[in-house]
Image (spheres, rainbow, N blue to C red):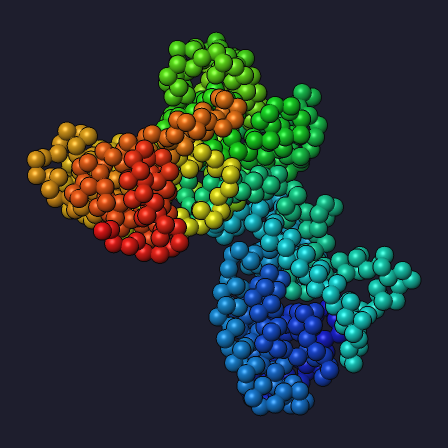
Amino acid sequence: MTVIRTPALNTGLDDFLSRADEEREARGEAPLPPRAADAVLTLLALRGAERRTGVPEPTARLLGPVLHEDLPALLWAGPEETDAVPEVLVALADRARAAGRLNTKRHARLLAAIEDALPEFRRAMADPWNLTWPRWYASLLRADGADADDPAAVRAWLAAHEDTPHAERPALPAPLHRSDVAARTFTARAQLGETLLAAFARDVEEPSPAGPLLPGGPLGADRPDEALPAELERIAAALSDRWTADGLAAALAGPDGPHAGLAPGPESIPHFALADRLLGEHLDYYGDSRRPLPPPPAPPAPEEIGALLHAAPLPAALAAGSDDVPHELAERCFDGAAATVWTDGTPEELTELAADILAAVVEDIGSTSDSEYAQDAAHLLYALYERGGTADSVVRKAAENGDLPVDPELEDAPVEVPERGPDRPAHEPYEMPPRDLLPALLGVPDPGDEELAGIEEHARALADVVDRLAATGCVYRVDDAYGLTPLGSAVLRHVLSAGHVAVPDAEEVSEWEAAEVVAAVRSWPERTAADTLGRWTAGRGLTAWSALLDAAEAAGAGTGAGADDRAARDRGGDDRRGERDQDRDGDHGAAGVDTAAVFARFALAAVPAEALRAALARPVTGAHAHRLLVSRGEAGPADAERVPLGARAALTLETLAEYGRRDLRTHARAAGRSGGEPDRDTPPRALPAAFDAAAAAWPGGAPALVEALVRADSPASRGGTALRVLEGVAAHHPDPTVASLAAHAAGPLRQGRPLPKTP
């Protein structure tokens, strides 16, 4: 039988077990496991359960916090102990009924509530995300046959485990990282501390007839306010040992515990903070951590991680104890445990070490660099991973901070990386690309001296941050091009995963359904998306392209995957997404799919003409398929006749919305150049002209086109796309008749009412 050691809280445990076991013996049942009973009674009491009968009385209100929050994080329990938890609760309910504390109806309701809470309790007990360091090591040492109730045996097992080569130690259950267990351990211990403090307050302010719950230490001290924190911490450690393994708390306690390195806290995992920052970046962009980022192009094999890390300048200097490395940086990410990992760590541990170094450098840049980009180092890393591993341009990125807006069509375009000769230094001083190359990089036909003023200063400041990141071996810069190294791709994938961002690899993507592929690639860089589509369809034949086109149609019609995803992104995004991401997203159809963007990626991936012809009759995407055939010179004379009018309207609405955004960008840039508002005597012209061209070719002219645009708008947009287009036409069309027609249609949309029939 498990022995429950002191200090015991005043829960009536011994009396409860004695009476319950007598009753169970009379029924031929085994005794209740003391560990499970102790945890249930203690946590009920700490949560404020009445103890008038000498034991805590369960209530329906307390079942959720105790069963679903406390026990899954604090109690190590084998199958028998897990099964005993509801029996303990039923025995407590029966005792309250026998003492007259519950009538028959309330007793029956409580038993039903216990039964209802059990499925979630069992799920939570098995959920790996509830794993803490004490529960993890309690499980491992029991699996090895160590006596969990003998502190000496526990200490001996921990010492042997710490001497075990890293590669031979059991791995955490997938998909957990050390940072996940560290965070859950910290949270569980903090919550236990809060419940203990609340229990102490009740002992003082609302004493129970059964006496104080907590031992008398803090109450009897001369200065209880000073003795209280240490006493509550002592009680918390004792309870943790009672519910996991005796002696674990002191052995694992940081920073002075003899085996504290086995149970790192969030503060001792530098990349924990970087993971949180990258998650924030992802939520700023997409509003949902489940939105997947592109897989890295060629991640290194696990056995290559060590060599890549050892070859990086800064990690090598840290390992050698170089005086050139800032002392604070060495202390932050290269202690004794890191030195052991450096020499014989597993690939995952080496990746974590590289992540710790990268995170420490990001923090160091933010505190020591005077570059205007010093606080953006984490953003730069995220943006490189989000590009799918393609190289970016320093001057193009720097132009965003200058007075020279970059063509949104070029934002995600990959940059050619010059070959570095064997005699060239790793990082030469930054120089702007030749002037004749800037139009292709920036999308500005002929940037003048005034437009380029200050851009070089921004670029040099950015290159300074990039070069400091490059010392970690995770980033490279060759002339104006910069990007992630293979080591950097592996490290950032690990850090993003630790932040619970969806970062599939190529193998995972290959197993996706067509709807998942379409939902993902719509916002990936075009070249990266096209490569992914090519790999996904390779070997699957024409049916794979048909499935993708079906998925695009379903998403555009609001029946495919992604509607909730887009809504989450819209809620989560903020101004940091900026014009770049709004331009890239465009006006999406239902389910949040930018059909034009999807078909642009289909085009780059060389979707077969046969698959496109089969899609011509589809009511949402048929016109997109036809436009792609026309652009490739593969459309037949009869193909246009197969495209439904509704599909033409959907494409026309998307096209007009793009012209409207183009007008907005033009005027915003004009305002920037003039230092104020643009000239109101020269209103936007692109949208009105495009509307006239579409109306001239539309059956029934402008009135019919307006009605078709409203009908074509997606449910997800709630008429918002059509409203923006019609308001733009109403505000800027030079023909009062057309402007009035658009205003007449926009009014009901603005008020959420259906469009009246056009006379």
| Foreground residue among 486 and 117 | 117
Where residue 298 appears, x then y in whole percent? 39, 31
Q: Nearer the viewer, residue 459 or 758?
A: 758
Q: Position of residue 118 (x, y in %)?
A: 51, 72
Q: Position of residue 538 (x, y in %)?
A: 23, 38
Residue at 82%, 70% in the rendered image: 204
Q: Is residue 674 above or below residue 86?
A: above
Q: Is residue 720 left or right of residue 347?
A: left
**Which of the 4 image quarters holds residue 335?**
top right
Q: Residue furthest left?
A: 637
**Is residue 567 visible to the viewer in this orientation of the structure?**
yes
The quadrant where residue 414 appears: top left
Q: Residue at x 32, y 43 (%)?
A: 740
From where the camera sits, is residue 295 visible? no
Which residue corresponds to the image point at 14% horizontal and 29% vertical from the top-left? 633
Most extreme residue toward the front, as rendered? Answer: 736
Q: Tell me what residue is drawn at x 33 percent, y 29 percent.
A: 685
Q: Is residue 65 above or below residue 660?
A: below
Please say if 518 is above or below 528.
below
Q: Is residue 682 left or right of residue 328?
A: left
- Left or right of 273 on screen, residue 525: left
Q: Quadrant of residue 197?
A: bottom right
Which quadrant holds the N terminus?
Answer: bottom right
Residue 391 position in % (x across, y down): 42, 25
